[in-house]
Amino acid sequence: MKKQGVVTLTAAAVLAGVAVTNSSVQADTNTANNGTVQKKTTTTAVTQAKSTVSAAQQEVKTAQANVSKAQASVANAAAAKSSAQSTLTAASSSASSATTAQSTAQQYKDAATSEGIDKAQSAVDSAQTQTNAAQQAASSAQQSVSAAQTDVSAKSSAASTANSAVTAKQQVVSSAQTQVDKDQAATSLATAQTAASNAQSAVDQTNDQIKSVTGDAEQAGIVLSQSYVDAYKDSLNDNGDDDTVMDRLENEVDNFETTAQITEYQPTTKDSNEVVDDVSNLTYAQAKSLTDFAASVINGLRAQVGSDPVQVTYGSVQAIMLAVAQEEKEDFDAFTEGSLAEMNSEAWWDTDFSTLGVKMTAYSETEPGAGKYEIGLDGWDLPTWQLYSTKNHTMAELKGGVYDDIQTLLKTQTGASNLLGQKLPDDMKGEYLGATFDSYGTLHLFFIDNYDASKIAAEEAQDASDDGASSGSSLLSGHEIPADAVFFKDTTTPAPFEIKSSSDTDSQETLTDLQTKLSTEQTKLTAANKALASAQLAAKDLGVTASDADAAQLAADQSKLATAKTELASAQKLVTTTKAALAEAQATLDAAQTQQATATKALSEAKATLKAAQQYLNNLQNADTNLTDAQATVTKAQANLLAAQKAYDATLAPVQTAQTALEAAKAALAVAKERLTTAQATLSKYQVVNGSKEDVTFSSNKSGKAQKVTLADKTTKSAAVVNKGKKAILQKQAVATTLPQTNSQDQGYLALLGMALLSLIGFAGVGRKRRI
């Protein structure tokens, strides 16, 4: 390519000359003569200095505009170069691709012999045959998949239908079962009612027979064996020296049932007919009747061992009813927890007996579980027997429970001790009994001790004197119930039951037989009532009554249920069969789909082979034409590449020229700014020397923006300051080598800059050739 000069020497000289000419500003100078400054008149110097500043400001403005124009030229030149570079890269790639294509075309040309073409044709024919076979295999596999899919759909539908049938049959069975359950519940209730009624009739009939022998008096009582009585009395006097005493008593309580004479309980007609709906809601009269019955049995036992009898009062019955109510309020189950836990429970010590005239003292401690009161009634409760249900009992059944509980207690040493008691000690005024049932069905026998407060105090004082301690009451001592308390209302001492005997052996045997019969029938009645309660609950849950019982309907519904179950079993079997068939069909489909995938892959590969063979044959058959086209393409691509290279090379010089011009413009701007600074300093000098107070506007060295400078008035500046300023100015002038009227020190600087620019760009126009 031809050489191109970036810029001529003449252009560089002109550029530098413009800078020199533009920077020429006439200014007044001061000539140093023996260190003395020569002044012009004040008005002329200041005016000329201002003119110089104004010219310098215009020079900076012009130089700044030249820099902006030069920067725009650089940007444009760079953009043109970048575009040419992209075109050159694309042309180079196209030329490379064309060359490769030409080489490939030449290879096909070389292989395009008669033998080569025949061989390629054979390959095409073979590939076509393989493709046809693969297509047939794929079609066959697709047909197999379609057939298998159809079979799976049919088998799936059959399985779904079978499942739906099972669901429907299950609903039929459930409905039939519910109806049978209702029929059976109604029948069971009717049967249970009949059984309970018959059992009650048998008990009533036997009771009538017994009454014909004994009358309608209540009968109960226990006669302890003499060995039992002796063993118990000895235990009261035992001080622990004789180990055999307690062993004898243990043996007696273990054999109580076989050694004691127990009269079969015989209720009154009234008690047999009086029904208690819920034992947790006993009236006072009912609780007192139970207490009187228990006291009669217990007093009969105490009479045999020589103990003082228990008494029954309004207060003793009410006391246990109050305690039970408090336990129910606090959800305390005495039967489950036990007697000892009950007597130490918070519920027991929360019971307020003050309504009975008993003195209650609030507990002074705040520890958990202590209860509200620390002084109440002394005694012990025995919650040791429980009903199986709290609902629908006769008074006769409840008293029978009391009788059973007493017999159970006599089988243990602790129970025997509480029941049989002893002679009251001197400091005890009496022992009282209260009995009732709680909401859990538990029987409570509460033995209450009433102490003599004066004797207790005397005993404590004596004990304190013997021990050498001060006297005082103890919370563990017994307490006395005030004599005028309502507790003692209606006090009685129930007499033991009279255990009748008859001199008429036949009559006694008849009574014994009837009592045995009654016991058996009462057991049956209890079982019948229990079965009835269960049947009533089941019937209530199903919404039927005894009147719904129908044997024929039950048989018919049972037959329907059996049929429904049979049909359900058949439907479930069909589900199993259809599921197996579906699984088999699905396996067949999976195998067919696998075969289809293999055939499809083989077909795809055969098609690819055929396409490649056909393309190769086509390339051989058109080798001449393809080679000619490839060569033409290469020629055109190379021509395009040469043109792109030439265009790219043409962008290099303008880029360099624009960049050089930009650097020159920046240098000229820097010189202009420096001259402005010098002119402004000169103006300031004259204004200070002449004491003028004027505003001067000039451009800063960096931003070029105008700044306002105010000089101090000579009337406010001291002489020392003025003189100091003059001295500084004289020193600065002495250093410079200034030519009058020319400012040649600044112009010399610009001349040097121009020469530097000429040396920089004078030989920068030599280009380089680029070989393609």
Image (spheres, rainbow, N blue to C red):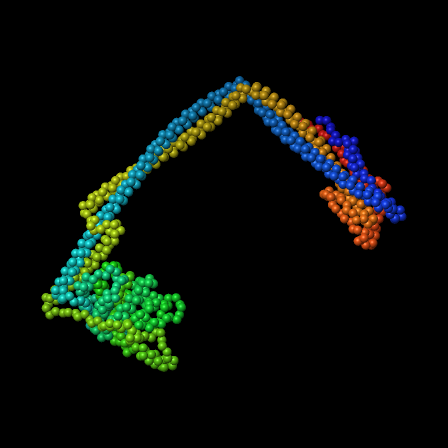
Left or right: residue 540 versus residue 468 is left
Q: Position of residue 60 (x, y in %)?
A: 75, 40
- Quarter of the image with the C terminus is top right
Viewer-closest of 543 and 755? 543
- 165 to 108, vertically: above or below: below
The answer to whether any part of residue 232 appears in the image is no
Q: Position of residue 634 (x, y in %)?
A: 61, 23
- Residue depicted at 29% across the width and 75% down the height: 484
Q: Position of residue 763 (x, y in %)?
A: 76, 32
The answer to whether any part of residue 746 appears in the image is yes
- 688 to 578, vertically: above or below: below
How many labels, in total? 0
- Residue depicted at 75% across the width and 33% down the height: 764
For residue 167, what is the image quadrant?
A: top left
Viewer-closest of 13 and 503? 13
- Quarter of the image with the N terminus is top right
For residue 492, what is the image quadrant?
A: bottom left
- Residue depicted at 76% across the width and 47% down the height: 709
Left or right: residue 21 versus residue 570 is right
For residue 568, what is the image quadrant?
A: top left
- 447 to 579, vertically: above or below: below
Left or right: residue 376 versus residue 286 is right
Q: Position of residue 637 (x, y in %)?
A: 62, 25
Furthest-top residue in view? 114
- Residue depicted at 20% across the width and 54% down the height: 192
